[in-house]
């Protein structure tokens, strides 16, 4: 059982590292108006936080170190985005 728990921790750490590596200018540029939420998750991974949510409108945030990406959705489609810290 202890071996299984160790593998779960290693897998979680690997997933976090892979997700963090997604916050690049290349992936940010793939996020275009009209893109679906599932596509954005494929590019950036799961959001770090939800900045706001009002009905079908929401603003999601991805953050790693000094890099922050904000994407605004209406009905799960991208309507805006901003970033800081990407090069």
Image (tube, helix red, strand yellow):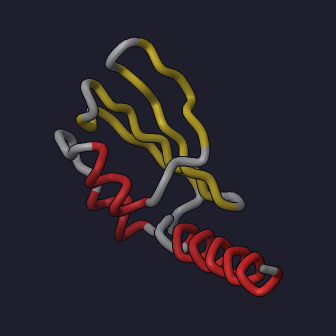
Front-lying residue, 37 or 11: 11
Q: How many circles with numbers are drawn on the protein?
A: 0
Q: Is residue 58 above or below residue 31?
A: above
Residue drawn at x 28%, y 25% as measured from the top left: 74
Q: Is 28 above or below relative to 72?
A: below
In the picture as drawn, the residue positioned furthest to the bottom comes out as 3
In the image, residue 36 lies at what x, y percent? Answer: 22, 44
**Residue situated furthest right in the rendering:** 2
Tell me the quadrant of the picture where the N terminus can be found.
Answer: bottom right
User: Does residue 42 appear left or right of residue 68 in this picture?
Assistant: left
Task: Specify the quadrant of the image occupied by residue 75.
Answer: top left
Q: Position of residue 56 (x, y in %)?
A: 32, 18
Horizontal side of residue 44 vs 4, given as left or right? left
User: Which residue appears farthest toward the top when viewing the image?
Assistant: 55
User: Which residue is rendered at x = 53% and y = 68% of the image?
Assistant: 19
Q: Residue at x 59, y 59 (%)?
A: 85
Q: Residue furthest left?
A: 34
Kindly identify the residue that appears in the image at 53 percent across and 76 percent down: 18
């Amino acid at each position: 059982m202890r071996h299984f728990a160790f593998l779960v921790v290693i897998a979680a750490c690997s997933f976090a590292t892979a997700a963090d590596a997604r916050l690049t200018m290349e992936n940010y540029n793939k996020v275009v108006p009209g893109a679906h939420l599932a596509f954005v998750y494929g590019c950036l991974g799961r959001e770090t936080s939800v900045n706001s949510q009002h009905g079908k409108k929401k603003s999601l945030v991805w953050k790693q170190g000094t890099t922050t990406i904000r994407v605004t959705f209406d009905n799960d489609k991208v309507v805006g985005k901003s970033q800081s810290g990407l090069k």
